[in-house]
Amino acid sequence: MMNVASMLRSREGIVHSVEAGQSVEEVIERFATSGVRCFVVLDDGRLVGVVAIRDVMGHLNKRGVDGFDDDVREVMTRDVVTVTPETSLEDVKERFRTHRFNHIPVVEDGRPVAVLTPRDVLGALVRESELANEYMRDYIAGSYS
């Protein structure tokens, strides 16, 4: 069964992040320039939260223009569900289904090394299934060696 580490071997290892202490306005600027929808929030390189566009929009809806100066810590999700490189993709898929969120940080030694989306995981699971089917067809046809 495929795990997160095997899936990450074929991906670029960029983790989009913001620093704890940045303002909501600075985070919005990063969303606008990065094209991503979720950042991990770091404090001295360690994961302390995640912030998604919808978190920021909800905050501004409540606070109005005064919310632009607020600290990202007021907006972020603190209790972050994470996985490790050793976590199976089936377990990651189940966490997405159970918790109904769109981003899961992969953490190693307290530091984020990747952020997964349901699309990443489902795509890897489909590729794994297709490969297993190909092996089975080859075996049945007698061309498996």
Image (spheres, rainbow, N blue to C red):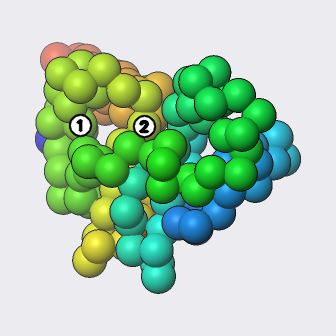
Tell which tag, 1 or 2, sits nearer the viewer.
2
Say how many tags the image has. 2
Q: Which image quarter: residue 125?
A: top left
Kindly indicate whether the residue at mark 2 contacts the one at mark 1 (C-beta within 8 angstroms).
Answer: no
Residue 44 rendering spot, x and y as whole percentages: 47, 82
Q: Judge left or right: residue 16 versus residue 47.
A: right
Name the residue located 38 percent from the left edge and 44 percent from the top edge. 77
Mark 1 / mark 2, whichever is N-terminal: 1
Relative image position of residue 115 (x, y in whole percent): 45, 49
Disc 2 target residue: 103
Q: Residue at x 20, y 31 (%)?
A: 95
Tell me if mark 1 has few (under 14), some (14-19) or many (20+) residues whose alpha carbon lies within 10 angstroms of its own: many
Please name the amino acid that badge 2 sits on: His
Rendered image quadrant of residue 99: top left
Q: Mark 1 highlights which residue? A: 92
Q: Which quarter shows the C terminus?
A: top left
Quadrant in which the N terminus appears: top left
Question: Left or right: 64 with respect to 116?
Answer: right
- Which residue is at a point 26% across and 60% down the rendered structure image? 85
10 Å neighbourhood of mark 2: few (<14), some, or many (≥20)? Answer: many
Q: Is residue 9 above or below residue 144?
A: below
Under circle 2, the secondary element is: loop
Q: Is residue 13 in view?
A: no
Query: Circle 1 sits in a helix, a strand or a loop, which is it?
Result: helix
